[in-house]
Amino acid sequence: MTLRIEHVSKTYANGVHAVRNVSLRIEPGMFGLLGPNGAGKSTLMRILATLQSPDSGSVQLGDLDLLRNPDAVRQRLGYLPQDFGVYPQVSAEALLDHFAVLEGMSARGERRDVVEALLRRVNLWDVRKQKLGGYSGGMRQRFGVAVALLGNPELLIVDEPTAGLDPAERVRFLNLLAELGERSVILLSTHIVEDVSELCTQMAIIDHGEILLEDAPLTAMQQLRGRIWRRVVQRSELTAIEQGQQVISTKLFGGRLVVHVHSHEHPGAGFEPAEPDLEDVYFCTMAGHMGARALAPA
Amino acid sequence: MKTWQTFRFELAYQLRRPWPWLGFASLFVFTFFFSREGVVPVTLTADFSVNAPFVVTAATVITSLLWLLVAAPIAGEAAARDVQTRMDQLLFTSPVVKAEHLAGRWLAALLLNALVLLGAQAGSVAAVLIPGLAPELVAPLRLGTYTAAFAYVALPNAVVGTTVQFAVALRSGRPMTSWFASFVLLFLAVPVSGFVAMPLGFPTVGRLTDPMGFIAIWNSVLLEWTIAEKYTRSFTLEGAALYNRLVWIGIAGAVWGLMYTRFRFAYRTPYQAIGWWLGRKRLRSTEERRANAAQSAPAGARATSSIGGGSAPTPAAARSFDARTRWLQLRRIASMSSVSLLRSPAGLFLLTVFPAFLLLVVTVQLRVLDVSILPRTGYLLSKYLTGATLKPENFWLLVPLLILYFAGELLWRERDARMADAHDTVPVPPWVPLAGKFVGLALVILLVLATTMTIGLFTQIRLGYARHELGLFTFVLFGLQFLDYLLLAALAFAVHTMVNQKYGGHLLAVLSYVFLLLAPRFGVEHPLLRYASSPPWSYTDLRGFGASLGPWSWFHLYWSAWALMLLVGATLLWPRGRETAIRARLQQARARLHRGALGLTALGGVAMAGSGAFIFYNTNVLHVYRNSDAQVALAAEYERRFGAHANEVQPSIVSTRLEADLEPSARRATVRGSYQLRNRHQEPIRELHIERAAGVRTTLQLSRAVQRIDSAPALGHEVQVLAKPLAPGDTLTLSFEVLAAPGGFRHTGAVNAIAANGTHITSALLPSLGYQPLRELMSPDDRRAAGLPRKVTLPTPDDVHPSMLAGDAGRFEAIVSTDIDQVVVAPGVLQRSWTDRGRRWFHYVSEEPIGGLHQIFSARYATAKSRWRDVEISVFHHPAHTQQVDRLTASARATLEYFSTQFAPYPYRFLQFVEQPAPGMGMGVDGSGVVTVLEGATLFNAPARGIDGSFEIAAHEVAHQWWGGMLTPAFAEGAILLSESLAWYSAMRVIRQEKGQEALRQFMQTMRNPSPWPPIRTGLPLLRAIDPYAGYRRGPFAFYALSEYAGETAVNTALQRLIAQHRGAAAGGSMRTLATTRALYRELQTSVPDSLRSLLHDLFETTTFWHFDTKAASARPLASGQWEVTFDVSARKVRVDTSGKETEVPIREWVELAVFAAAGPGEVLGTRLYLGRHQLRAGTQRVTVVVNGKPARGGVDPYNLLDWEEGDNIEAIGDKRSPD
């Protein structure tokens, strides 16, 4: 069940080109879509979730045309939105059961089993009878996951799922996704690089509606080997270094400034070679040292 | 200052939204039409200028009610937008003080609402300035009128409304609840206050419970301003209006205070926000549970940090997308929807407060004249338990409004909770949630109807009535009324789906409903064009539903087809996903067009076209359809063409002979008959003006040669010119045959006159002679538009020619056949009755001339006959309605006895009481010798002694045979005094004679209740009375007072002479002249002793009120064994002139004072120890009397001869022993 996105574009009424000629081929497994805020990730996610329609292009899930058969696609779809609410006066169990009915599970016994399993899965079984209005943010997020997982979707779209989860919850969530990735297409849209690097076998980097890079994370990191250098600097030296080198990131580590620089040869004194990680890939792509921006005419 | 900053920001924010402007526009347009179309109801069609203060004030009050429904989002948004948009956390942590925040927001909302309300004033002014209005209707534009209306009416309303809406929205955290606040205010203003003021009988309280001034201002102005004042008086705040404003501003202040103290800049969890009415207790327990859960969960969670909370794979459940699953999903959505509605504040209100109010209304209203009414199922259903959705005349208005509100809430539920994305991506086609929510709303409506039925049954059980007729309850409530509400729900669903904006949807839904209510005023009259309209169903015990269900069903089939298509359209346009642009939604709609939708649309289309065609055939082809413009044009044409003949002499009908064949089951009647016409005037008659009745086929033939016939069939009038004029004293015969077969139905419904059981046809079906002035246009507006001269609506009594003749009276004979199991009633004495050829025949004759409307009834009546002298008294009634028969007969006998001795002998040899198949409460007299008893009047369920309702009303109606029958008033001011007041006065005398003075005293006490006739001040004295209060209350009280002072004989002999005078020269009541109050007054002046001339003058020639009050009463025993009673009384006499100005005048008449002993068991007052007249002066004074026997109660004017205020003047007498 491959997801093929071909030349999809969408422009909003206020002139913003949210998605520009995006083409992706996504095999079963975890696919990470990485990009800054406002890159067009959520728009693309919503198009794939049948909530919005593109101005042009096509999307195929297996042999189903998503734009022509949205109903059929919804039967195979699970969607966890970035920002959602719940009915405050309904309990988790009742609302999950309601969604299970909407997902077509008409047999009561089977449905009950599914609801129980999912609630245990997301660790909400003990609080299943509480009203959703009293849930914390993390609990609400877990409930959304349960809803998205109903019906064993073949296409699971999760939009910024770990923002707002504490470290333990985040780990739990990512583990959960990893298990599912064996069978379905899981599209994970995020701006947290670690999520992608830990989980995804494939990824794409998107900015201003365009795909800048589509590759496996390991391959991309490999590509940068030998081109990333790091140095601990004083704040006063920063400006000079920025003028002289292609600084791709400036971070604080233990209270000291660490710069990462992209260079094909050794940049000079003080710099040591760094093992490129996905964050470096991300910054390099955004800066135009690799990916689509690197190929574009100057 | 932060307040200013908050205020400015809020103002700017909302001014950039559409709804304040839409609110302004709606009020503007509404007031414009309101002022122009003269929607102002008054007692007479009067010609008020469009900018008279009366009209402007009325428009402002009415528009305030519309404002409540239209502008609720303003206050709601100002109060709760922060919480709704979850911006509260940002705002509440900024350094803004509670007072500044609330004040700033509230002021902004208030200013916006005040600006919206200015739309009403603007509309009022525009109504005058925009050309198209006749110049006579425009008074000089006075700014003071508008500022007064705005400052006294609109602005306080804005303060009260804004504050309550603001407080409710603030508390709940949802802007939409401001609408709920509006509903509650509307509910208080119209139904509740109206009920408290009138049926409950507490007008002062009712004027204080009204937040919008509907009862306090509008109703008061309507009733209390004299006609002259309505033209000129400016509106100022005084009396009840002032107190109302003060009280409600005070309440608004209290609400403000409460809101201020309870509001906190605190973070609201969603649960807290909605659970505010569940109370803190529940919240605490859930918090405890959460704490426990949090404690127990982490241990387990940490243990499984590497995997999810359970490593077992999720079991697979079979998923299906077939019809069964869709049905399950629909059921689920329906139950979730209905539960969410029932738990909302509005839902709780609809299921608790509303039924409580309904129960209160039913309980109170089931007493008429202080006699309890049998709660018959049909009567309960027609009068109290159902309400026409398009004619909201009472509290049932609230249900359609709440249906509109609920529809919006249901359709926006997911989006409000931010769950729309999750719901939009489930594999459920849009018709499932639409149908589910519709069914959910339907379930709530069913619950309301079930509650209504429970109240009906409870009332019946409580009053010991056992014939519950559950089938009728079920059919009417769950069949007829339910379908009406469903049609409205479908409209609301369609509107909210298409207008994909929450406030816009609500606004449009409300405005659509208001438009539907007022559609005829906007020119949309034909029921085929007005959504959800249909001729009403009607139910009476005698006739059942009659023919009313036929057209009702056809119309509802037609509108249901429309509703189905609307719902299909809503499904196609169902908002799903984030695309809100029109084009995208239309694309979505096109993609959703599949077999099912097309099929349903086709089905709806076919049903609509088919039923519509059938209806159109009935209303426009089988019958003539004329909208109001066409009717006005017709009436104008009639007057223009034939008005010149208005005073032309015509021959009189001296004898009528009818042969009628009634076929009730076929709904057909054939009447063959003839009039014998005689020229009773001094000049020859050349032309005969004959009119045929509308809706029947008439053929006629004169017995004399006719030279030519000028006919105007469209106007229903023809002139037959005789070859040889009819000489004075000569006769001719007019023969006719009338076929009444009103098949099908008109746009107003099926003609019910000929029914399977309960036929009632009148001589209105027969040809009539002469020009009919009642067919002329009455409204000054219409006359002006048609170019007709201005008509004096009612001449004064002095402007009536003394020798104007009364209508014809003649011999009457009827031979009527009907179904074999029915009884025919026709005026006259029944000569004989026989069966022949499977039908039953009746032969009635009245040799004594009878006049008025001749009525023929046919139904499965039971008959009760008795005699009084040579008069046959018959009561024809529904076989199960037996309670009243004896009382009617007793009343008839007593009345005939009294009247024949006091006034004039009863001229006929029959007196018939006929139960008429109509659901009203009351009786009527339209023709000689016949009293029609509406079915409601058979419901009196009275104790054996005292007032029973039927006796009293029957006495009044029989009295009409004299007052109205033998003595016919001229069409002038004061006519109502001669008919209604004299009827009640003489009935009161009969009551006193038969039941005693105490019974009459209690009866007069119930007469003084404001329901059904609240005191109206017209400024006109009784001799010029025109309004029902003067006719049915003031007049009788005045006559009674006069007769107590001058003596019954004096007054009655005057009346006797009055009848004799107008009887005419010839025997048999022919050539009677019309009477005026001038003649009455002359006779009274002759009879009444000189010492009472001033009282007579006060009572009839002026508007004078006496106010007496017994402030304190005490007694002490005397040595002789008698008791000395001391009263502190206050007295006041006020005269009101036509412009409403009141002056105090000295009291010249001696006033009664009475003392009563203690009451025995079952009595209200004990034996009367003393009754005497004392000279009182204005102001307070002390009066002392000595009585034999221990006094218990007493007072001044105990029989309310002069003091006609509600309540009585009798107080308890306290003990005052002198210290020994």
Image: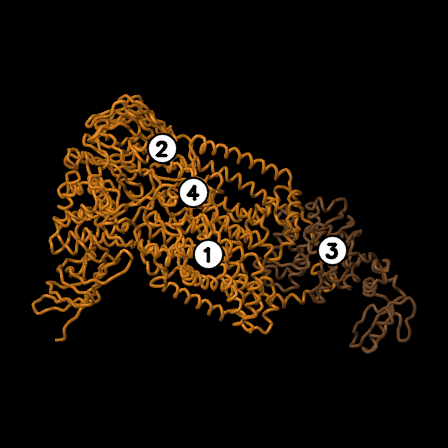
Q: Disc 2 on helix, strand or loop?
A: loop
CA gap between label 3 and label 1 equals: 46 Å
Mark sitting on residue B755: 2
Chain assignment, label 4: B
User: B263 above or below B188?
Assistant: below
Chain assignment, label 1: B
Q: Are the residues flagged by discs 2 and 1 in contact, CB closer than 8 Å? A: no
- Of the image marks 4 and 1, the number of the one nearer the N terminus: 1
Give the colour scheme of this rendering. by chain
Residue type of the residue flagged with mark 3: His
The residue that disc 4 covers is B474
CA gap between label 2 and label 3 equals: 73 Å
Quarter of the image for residue B963 reads top left
The residue that disc 1 covers is B120
Mark sitting on residue A17: 3
Label 4: few (<14), some (14–19) or many (≥20) C-alpha neighbours in 10 Å:
some
- Of the image marks 2 and 1, the number of the one nearer the N terminus: 1
- Is any atom of residue B356 visible in this view? no
